[in-house]
């Protein structure tokens, strides 16, 4: 017979795995009540009697995102905040636009694996595995090519073509989230102490200050 300790360890592991992805629905749907002031993991359900087809639809992924910004990309997430019917479904979708030779810089989705397809253009994409290997998986994708990014991995998409590029992405979370590495490291509010950045990257204060100035 398994020891109670072992049983507890197995149970803890099973619970941890269940928490790694969005929880599954306990009814047909639980359309998010985005205005509720009850704070739970996800959103409370709005009264099913008031649910309409509009709660399950969104229009606008046919619209080209404006890429006239510093990096030259634009991401439109259709997550639970934009499509309340996604609450508890564990999926979402998004569109990314890339200006020629510009990049969607290093980022991660803390709560979702991603699968995306290129609709237009050519993207050089890559993700890096966790420590200790830090292996880069790099590939060039043309229209119709599909790429998967494991949950939490740091990745990028670089439009290496001469024209604009467009991709449509699916996520296994109603709220995948996005962490841009540069924003988290160099644009936190309040800022991470310079000494912490110096010691983290093993460089001098001048290098850190130059980097910080890029993101002011
Ligand atoms: C996008 O689709 C909507 C219908 O949902 C339409 O009204 C709009 O004109 C389309 N926009 C573009 C840029 O194609
Ligand atoms: C993304 O595109 C939309 C639609 O054109 C625009 O409203 C928004 O400001 C753009 N975002 C950025 C960061 O440029
Ligand atoms: C990652 O690195 C470890 C330690 O060097 C090694 O044992 C392991 O096989 C590597 N895993 C992969 C997927 O390359």
Image (spheres, rainbow, N blue to C red):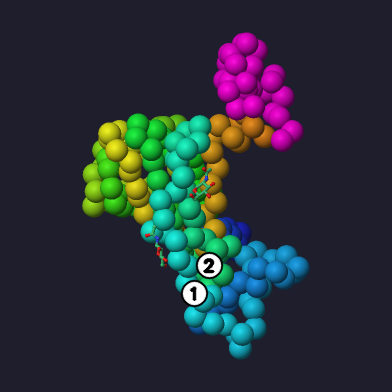
At label 2, counting other C-alpha atoms closer than 10 Å, the crowd grade (few under 14, some 14-19, many 20 or more) is many
Task: Read off the magenta span.
Answer: 189-216
Apparent side of residue 58 relative to residue 210 in the rendered image (left or right) = left
Residue 30 position in % (x across, y down): 57, 77
Decide which of 7, 105 is in the foreground and name it.
105
154 shown above or below 146: above
Element type at marker 1?
helix
Q: Which mark is residue 149?
A: none
What's the residue at 56%, 70% (across, down)?
A: 84
Does the magenta portion include 203?
A: yes
User: Residue 59 lies in what quarter of the image?
Assistant: bottom left
139 shown above or below 174: above
Residue denoted by label 2: 83
90 shown above or below 215: below
Q: Main secondary structure of the magenta part?
A: helix
Q: Are marks 2 and 1 in contact (CB under 8 Å)?
A: yes
What's the residue at 24%, 44% (across, down)?
A: 142
Quarter containing the C terminus: top right
- Residue at disc 2, CB closer than 8 Å to ligand 1: no
101 shown above or below 20: above
What's the residue at 54%, 35% (across, down)?
A: 181
Residue denoted by label 1: 56
Upstream in the sequence, badge 2 or badge 1? 1
Q: Estimate the spatial distance between the alpha carbons at disc 2 and disc 1, rounded to whole Å.
A: 6 Å
Residue 197 position in % (x across, y down): 64, 22
What's the residue at 52%, 61% (across, down)?
A: 79
Residue 201 position in % (x across, y down): 57, 20
Q: How many marks?
A: 2
Does the magenta portion include 101?
A: no
């Amino acid at each position: 017979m398994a020891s109670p300790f072992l049983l507890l360890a197995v149970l803890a592991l099973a619970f941890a795995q269940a928490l790694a992805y969005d929880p599954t629905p306990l009814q047909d749907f639980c359309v998010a009540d985005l205005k509720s002031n009850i704070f739970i993991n996800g959103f409370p359900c709005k009264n099913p009697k008031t649910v309409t087809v509009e709660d399950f639809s969104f229009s606008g992924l046919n619209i080209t995102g404006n890429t006239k910004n510093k990096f030259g990309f634009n991401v439109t997430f259709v997550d639970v905040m934009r499509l309340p019917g996604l609450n508890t479904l564990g999926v979402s979708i998004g569109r990314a636009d890339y200006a020629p030779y510009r990049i969607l810089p290093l980022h991660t989705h803390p709560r979702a694996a991603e699968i995306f397809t290129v609709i237009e253009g050519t993207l050089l994409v890559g993700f890096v595995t966790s420590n200790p290997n830090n292996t880069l998986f790099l590939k060039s994708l043309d229209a119709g090519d599909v790429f998967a990014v494991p949950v939490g991995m740091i990745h990028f998409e670089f439009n290496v073509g001469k024209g604009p590029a467009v991709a449509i992405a699916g996520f296994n979370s109603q709220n995948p989230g996005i962490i841009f590495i540069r924003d988290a490291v160099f644009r936190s509010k309040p800022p991470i102490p310079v000494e912490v950045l110096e010691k983290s990257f093993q460089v001098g204060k001048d290098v850190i200050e130059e980097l910080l100035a890029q993101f002011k």
